[in-house]
Amino acid sequence: MAPAAKPSAQADAGTAKTPVAKTTASVKASPAVAKAKVPPVVAKSTPPADAPVAPKAKPASRGVLSMLSRGEHDALVKLLSKQQPSSVLEVGVGDGSRTPAIVHSLTETQPELKYAVIDQFEMVGGTLKLRDFHGQLVGLSIRPSIIPEPAARGIVTVLHRLGMMDAIILDPSLDSETLIEIETVIGKVSHADTTILRQTNGKWAASASTSTTLRSNRRAA
């Protein structure tokens, strides 16, 4: 009876070995899966919510104060300040910086100052554009009258709009032909007390008008 039990035990042993081996193989991960790793999460640093943000600096603009700090018009301003004119005419504005320097100085004692400029700007190839000149006048207490016409014609226009002037500034850039034309009409806006200012050898000098007309603020009809 004992030998008959052996085949059953061997069959049971064989049956137990086969499924165990297969189960072990199915649990092992493939090499591709083993290599794939989830990247670590790195926390990003963020500024505190209440941290103040500095405002962006604006580019410096060329305003009235920057014109005055250059000091290149001090001599002319000093001449005009001594005379205290109530009306000024500029024939030719140069680079445009002279006008705000004079207006700012004179309006401190002459708040009702009449100021006019004659220049054709870019219309005759000038380096200063009319739009840019307007920008240089920002911040002034008065607004100068701008006459974009040829010098001789502009002087007649000034006479009709503002009358005679106490001081007339002739820009150094005016050519000889233009100066001759100005001489023929400058008497229209001048009176006996009018001062003519022009540069001689790089320095501003004042001369009396040759007009014999009495001082008057009357405008031409």
Image (cartoon, helix red, strand yellow):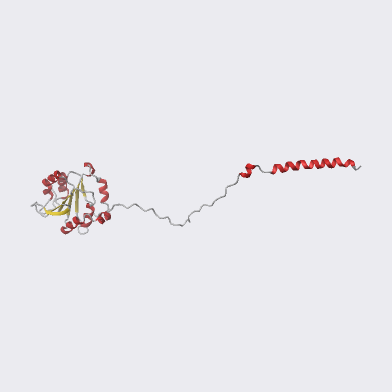
Quarter of the picture holding the N terminus:
top right
Q: Measured along the vertical axis of the image, is residue 82 above or below residue 37?
A: below
At 73% from the left edge and 42% from the top edge, which residue is drawn?
Answer: 23
For the point 83% across and 41% down, which residue is it? 10
Residue at image x 63%, y 44%? 34
Q: In this view, does 75 lie to the left or right of 210?
A: right
Total label count?
Answer: 0
16 or 54, which is in the foreground?
16
Measuring from the top left, give residue 202's x and y in whole percent.
Answer: 17, 52
**Residue 139 visible to the viewer:** no
Q: Residue furthest left?
A: 212
Residue 162 is situated, as x and y percent measured from the top left of the image, at 16, 50
User: Residue 166 falls in which quadrant of the image?
Assistant: bottom left
Query: Which residue in the rendered view is the most extreme toward the right?
Result: 1
Nearest the viewer among 196 and 116 is 196
Q: Could one spot residue 33 in this view of the protein?
A: yes
Q: Residue at x 19, y 52 (%)?
A: 115
List x then y, in percent, for residue 89. Answer: 17, 51
Task: Answer left or right for 39 relative to 135.
Answer: right
Judge left or right: residue 214 versus residue 107. Answer: left
Nearer the observer, 77 or 113: 77
Q: Position of residue 25 (x, y in %)?
A: 71, 42
